[in-house]
Image (cartoon, helix red, strand yellow):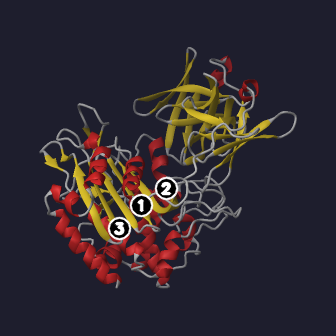
């Protein structure tokens, strides 16, 4: 039955791809829905802009497949439903699927130690399992973020899997002990692609073709394991926003794949969603794919195996977004309504999550009952009491700073998001479900508990604002070296401004955040601390790299 369903969606998809564009709305969706869909993509429906392709299916049957804007601005060539795009991190679910299939075949256990197959991974004293990699709880630093510290990030240098293994092998610390927290890291998905090759004795691309793409008839799908290979029908990718007069080319220049790198079409992605919805690979496979990660604390997170499991518009969804260079992607399944949405774009200014959710809203029925809205301001503290919550707060894991200010009678998070008081000790962050709970630790000392559904609980500690200038900053001058990042950075005090220099000619102004901690736009966060041997160090942190040490040289 599942194979018949897959064949049906492929046949209908082929018909749709070669049909005139006005046939989509007349045959498979009502004119009102098509008009709403066109309105969502109006910014990208032009011969002078890049754009998107979008497909919607229900019960395995395509409702509509449409395209907007240009695939190539130089030639020029328009986007069509059959245009090939890169799917960014939507690609991860296909790596997860391949590893799950290997586990079901008995070739590997998802609870095995990763170092059994990847001995290049340092021994950190705690076992890192494949399941940790699948749901981003391994604690491994993101290799691309480490590479970018040196100035040779993923958009500046052509990397392959040997580079990934080299960078991973040099990391002396984890971001956190395995299973303690969630931190998105491409490293795990590249290691899984490498492991699949070592286990099967064939390339990861060949294995996924044989086990997934070929059986499902995903004939337009392949891995970008060689970015120089000619791929007919592939769109170019661009940097720019809606309304820009000029766009710049922004295509990947790397051979690394698994974390991203899937070249595909909206039709092939809908074929894949049909396979998931129909349990084509079996119930055990489906269960592994959507089983959410559980932290050591017992808390369940939203991330499963290459997909997130959460809610949108009152419906449960299995979803992921993607972004690599100028490509953007969104894929979501709504099991309760048997609806799937596939979105692929070739411009940075297209927000995949916002666009994809807006598309879903057009084709989802109103859920039963009233969809509750986030509570706003039902319990008020006095203005003077609210002002007690203003200040600088830091995350003790990575020293990231959060600022709460008082503006026009409201609490603001980092200058733009309103914090709505909902109790005597809690605020809601904007229209989200995230709560900030202010907890008195005694003697009037507060910290913030950050509570988000699908994430571990976080703590933010109060910090004293840094002065605009302090003569003691001269102690920070010198040359600092990191073996983890293979990078040297020179710190100079120029007048009242600290400057970071990186070879060959990069300079970064250090803006004070709080005591001994600075933000370097384009580089990351730098916190100066005494080293264990009495030598000054600075700790580098960014979104996916915690506590990377640079030691001051004589």
At horizontal 75% and vertical 24% (from top left) the residue drawn is 384
| Percent coordinates x, y for residue 393 in the rendering | 68, 35
In the image, farthest residue toward the right: 443
| Percent coordinates x, y for residue 68 in the rendering | 23, 48
In the image, farthest residue toward the top: 495
Secondary element under disc 2, as helix, strand or loop, is: strand
Judged left or right of residue 514, residue 310 is: left
- Quote the CA–CA distance across marks 3 and 1: 12 Å
At horizontal 37% and vertical 48% (from top left) the residue drawn is 355
Image quarter (top left, top right, bottom left or bottom right) of the C terminus: top right
The earlier-in-sequence mark between 2 and 3 is: 3
At horizontal 64% and vertical 23% (from top left) the residue drawn is 409
* Proximity of marks 2 and 1: CB atoms separated by less than 8 Å: yes
Q: Does 353 sit above or below residue 478?
A: below
Q: What residue is shown with label 3?
A: 58
Query: Picture quarter containing residue 475?
Result: top right
The earlier-in-sequence mark between 3 and 1 is: 3
Q: Which mark is residue 332?
A: 1
Q: Nearer the viewer, residue 200 or 433?
A: 433
Q: Does 16 sit above or below residue 8?
A: above
Query: Picture quarter containing residue 221?
Result: bottom left
Judged left or right of residue 174, residue 4 is: left
Q: What residue is shown with label 2?
A: 312
Q: Does 151 sit above or below residue 192?
A: above
Judged left or right of residue 252, residue 48 is: left
- Quote the CA–CA distance across marks 2 and 3: 17 Å
- Quote the CA–CA distance across marks 2 and 1: 10 Å
Q: Which mark is residue 287?
A: none
């Amino acid at each position: 039955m599942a194979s018949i369903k897959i064949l049906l969606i492929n046949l209908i998809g082929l018909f749709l791809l070669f049909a005139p564009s006005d046939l989509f709305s007349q045959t498979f969706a009502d004119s009102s829905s098509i008009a709403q869909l066109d309105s969502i993509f109006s910014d990208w429906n032009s011969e002078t802009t890049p754009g998107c392709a979008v497909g919607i299916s229900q019960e395995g049957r395509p409702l509509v497949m449409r395209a907007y804007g240009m695939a190539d601005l130089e030639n020029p060539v328009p986007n069509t439903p059959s245009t090939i795009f890169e799917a960014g991190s939507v690609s991860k679910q296909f790596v997860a699927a391949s590893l799950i299939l290997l586990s079901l075949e008995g070739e590997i256990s998802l609870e095995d130690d990763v170092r059994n197959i990847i001995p290049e991974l340092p021994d950190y004293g705690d076992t890192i399992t494949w399941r940790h990699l699948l749901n981003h709880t391994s604690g491994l630093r993101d290799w691309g973020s480490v590479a970018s510290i040196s100035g040779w990030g993923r958009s500046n240098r052509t990397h392959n899997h040997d580079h990934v293994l080299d960078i991973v092998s040099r990391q002396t610390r984890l971001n956190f002990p395995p299973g303690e927290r969630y931190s998105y890291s491409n490293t795990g998905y590249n290691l899984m692609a490498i492991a699949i090759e070592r286990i099967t004795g064939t390339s990861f691309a060949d294995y996924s073709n044989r086990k997934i793409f070929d059986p499902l008839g995903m004939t337009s799908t392949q891995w970008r394991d060689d970015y120089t290979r000619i791929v007919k029908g592939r769109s170019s990718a661009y940097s720019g926003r809606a309304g820009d007069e000029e766009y710049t080319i922004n295509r990947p220049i790397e051979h690394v794949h698994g974390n991203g790198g899937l070249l595909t079409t909206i039709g092939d992605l809908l074929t894949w969603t049909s396979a998931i919805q129909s349990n084509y690979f079996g119930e055990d496979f489906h269960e592994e794919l959507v089983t959410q990660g559980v932290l050591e604390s017992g808390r369940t997170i939203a991330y499963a195996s290459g997909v997130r499991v959460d809610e949108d518009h009152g419906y449960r969804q299995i979803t992921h977004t993607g972004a690599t260079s100028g490509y953007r992607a969104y894929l979501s399944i709504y099991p309760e309504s048997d609806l799937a949405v596939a979105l692929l774009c070739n411009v940075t200014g297209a927000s995949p999550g916002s666009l994809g959710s807006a598309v879903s809203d057009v084709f989802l029925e109103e859920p039963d009952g009233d969809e509750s809205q986030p509570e706003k301001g039902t319990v008020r503290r006095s203005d003077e009491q609210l002002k007690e919550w203003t200040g600088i707060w830091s995350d003790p894991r990575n020293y990231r700073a959060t600022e709460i200010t008082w503006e026009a009678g409201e609490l603001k998070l980092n200058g733009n998001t309103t914090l709505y008081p909902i109790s005597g000790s809690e605020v809601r962050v904007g229209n989200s479900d995230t709560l900030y709970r202010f907890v008195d630790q005694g003697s009037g000392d507060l910290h913030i508990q950050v509570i988000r559904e699908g994430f571990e609980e976080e703590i933010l500690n109060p910090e004293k604002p840094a002065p605009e200038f302090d003569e003691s900053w001269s102690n920070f001058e010198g040359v600092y070296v990191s073996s983890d990042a293979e990078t040297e950075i020179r710190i100079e005090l120029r007048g009242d401004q600290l400057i970071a220099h990186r070879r060959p000619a990069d300079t970064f102004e250090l803006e004070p955040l709080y005591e001994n901690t600075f933000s370097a736009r384009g580089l990351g966060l730098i916190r100066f601390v005494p080293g264990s041997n009495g030598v000054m160090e600075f700790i580098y942190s960014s979104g996916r790299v915690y506590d990377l040490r640079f030691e001051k040289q004589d």
